[in-house]
Amino acid sequence: MELTRKLAQFVCDTQFKDLPDSVVGKARECFLDWQGVALAGTVDPAAAIMMCYVRDAGGHPEASVIGSNIKTDMANAAMANGLIGHALDFDDYHDETVIHASAACVPAILAIAEKFNKSGQDFLTAMVLGIDVCIRVGLGLGDYHYQRGWHTTATAGTFGATAGAAKLLGLDVDRLVTAFGICGTQAAGLRQVFGTMCKPFHAGKVSREGILSASLARLGFTGPKTMIEGELGLFDVLTEKPDETVVLDRLGQEYYINHLSIKPYPT
């Protein structure tokens, strides 16, 4: 079975009852941390610009933009909340891959959960799985990927946001494989933008991409079946020495949300 499909199978099969208590507790901690950091980020100039954009864009009032009275469609709410949550660079991260995992995954999952009135257990399950997927993909890309200039939050992060969104939307394995194909062709983001508003925008764009990819796949949109491991796919193009084995190592036994660091200081 191909790597992309194994990840999709894991996401679809895993339920809240399968998650260890320590994993659920860490997810709650990371969500609370993300909320606090995002509320603080609402005063950032980039957040103000993004709020103006989504307010002007309109859209069905499906999901809320944190710290405001704005309700817009799921994708734009996720994009705004992704940027806002990463605006201060104070959000949690994974040391080895340098992925800001909650900033990439939570906004997409939160927007879907709000629209469809999902339970807290459903939300936490999707959050744990999304973060697990994005870090595993980041580990597979390896250090070369980041050192070459790619922003891993913006590349691997889109797979996490898609996995979490797909879980809440109830996609089956075949459609999640397709969703990974759709998000994989959008996986981009360069470190040259660090120090500008484009860095937190990366977290917003992957949150939006997650909803877009899962939603299109749900409707029958097509895409490649081996986006991660296939020829001219993610690992073939965006890194020098990909490690497929680390992506699946202890899958369902070790959850990488437990490896996230919560910053006591912003730098």
Image: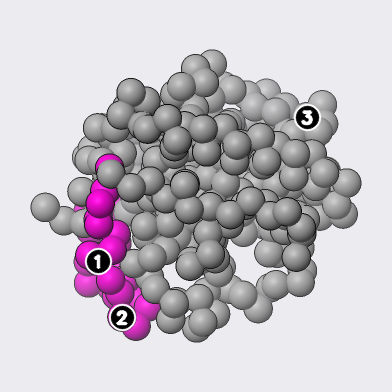
Dominant SS in magenta: loop
Q: Is residue 222 magenta?
A: no
**SS class, disc 3:** loop
The kind of residue on which mark 3 rests is Ile
In the image, residue 38 above or below residue 267: above
Q: For the view shown, which residue lies furthest in the front direction?
A: 22
Residue range of the region highlighted in magenta in the rendering: 223-252
Residue at the (75%, 34%) spot, across then down: 66
The answer to which of 54 and 167 lies nearer the viewer is: 167
Query: Pointer 2: what residue?
Result: 241
- Can you give x and y, in whole percent of width and height, for residue 122 in the image? 44, 24
**SS class, disc 2:** loop
Point out the image quarter for the C terminus.
bottom right
User: Residue 244 bears which disc, if any?
Assistant: 1
Residue at the (62%, 31%) spot, across then down: 73
Query: Pointer 3: what residue?
Result: 70
- Can you give x and y, in whole percent of width and height, for residue 231 in the image? 22, 72
- Say if residue 238 shows up in the picture: no
The kind of residue on which mark 1 rests is Glu
In the image, residue 226 above or below residue 80: below
Disc tally is: 3
Q: Give the distance between the C-alpha atoms of the residues marked 1 and 2, in whole angstroms.
A: 10 Å
In the image, residue 163 above or below residue 206: above
